[in-house]
Image: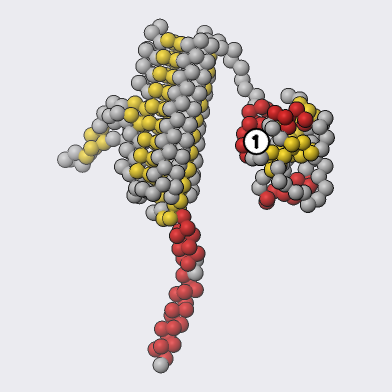
Amino acid sequence: MKIRAAELASMVEGQLDGNPDILIYTASKIEEAKEGSICFFANPKYEHFVYQTTASAILVNENFVPKQKINATLIRVKDVYQTVANLLSIFEQKTEMNFQIDPLAKIDPSATLGDQVSVGAFSVIGSGVKIGSGVTIYPQVYIDTNVQIGDHTIIFPGVRIHRNCIIGKNCVLNYNVIIGSEGFGFVPTENGSYKKIAQIGNVILGDEVEIGSNTCIDRGSMGSTTIGHGTKLDNLIQIAHNVQIGKNTVIAAQSGVAGSTKIGNNCQIGGQVGIVGHISIADGTRIQAQSGVASSVNVENSKLYGSPALDYTNYLRSYAEFKKLPELARSIREMVKTRQDF
């Protein structure tokens, strides 16, 4: 791809500051950018790179005031991060499958496929499956019986979607995602062994849901495990049976949610967070990475940290005191010794 800085600025609704005719070929990180690339600057910790980079152009916030001379052309925008998200989609190189059904794919005759559907080699589509228009199914995907997939969803290699699950429109399922695996359901018996409880439910994903690689979402034991419209899950996440996650919630990698927990809309959950089962988490809750949530969060827009998780501000104050414990203990011992001397 080759584009003039002026054209790119117009595409992202930015204000140009510098050479409008300089050519841009790719996007790069600011610390690695070379001539012909565009990078971005938003975090103050990276400001020194702005003056050192050989990038042809830099995205900056519209109120940025340079402290030194900058050789690159600046494109000033209202929100750098939002603009970067749009910009990367411009530079993204997608593999075109040309809406073909590979002859090595196996599709049950009872399955129905919409217009312009691509199915890669060695993918299997079971009986009663319904696939919408413009869906892209990469090689080595398994789609079990009676699955429904909405328009323009993208399914990457290695994905497994088990029976009766429903995938919305414009979803993205990344490599090796498992949708509808068996929930962890067992009942102890008198002899100390465990008897398996059948898991007969399904998984329902709303529209515009994105699931990261190697994430597993268990089907409901009865009823559905549900992921709301616009929710994004990172790689390596475990969602247990009958969990309900609301709209536009994001969960970072290596987090786990136990069975029948309800997570609200617009929540932000950091990496390696553990959430116990059968609790509710209110809309807008933010949970810091590596926290453990052991009870319901009933107040909307709460901020939590720690294990078990506390109010974010209280945790920081408590941890600040915790770091002083050796010094405090020493002071107490000295006070006790002083009193004994009297």
The quarter of the picture where residue 148 lies is top left
Q: Residue at x 42, y 91 (%)?
A: 341
Relative height, residue 201 to residue 341 (above, below): above
- x and y percent of residue 287 in the render? 46, 48
Task: Classify 139 as above or below 299.
Answer: above
Residue 256 left/right relative to 221: right
Residue sitting at x 67%, y 45% = 42
Q: Tag 1, which secondary structure?
A: helix
Query: Compared to 187, does 119 lie above or below?
Result: above
Q: Amino acid at mark 1?
A: Val
x, y percent for residue 324:
49, 69
Name the outermost residue toward the bottom: 342
Q: Position of residue 249 (x, y in %)?
A: 46, 38
How far across and down, in percent of the image, does residue 122 sit? 49, 15
- Crowding around mark 1 (Cα neighbors within 10 Å: few <14, some 14 to 19, many 20+) is some
Disc 1 designates what residue?
A: 84
Q: Give the quarter of the figure containing the N terminus.
A: top right
Q: Is residue 193 left or right of residue 11?
A: left
Q: Residue at x 37, y 12 (%)?
A: 127
Residue 290 appears in view: no
The residue positioned farthest toward the left in the image shown: 190
Of 118 and 207, the residue lying toward us: 207
Residue 111 seen in the figure = yes
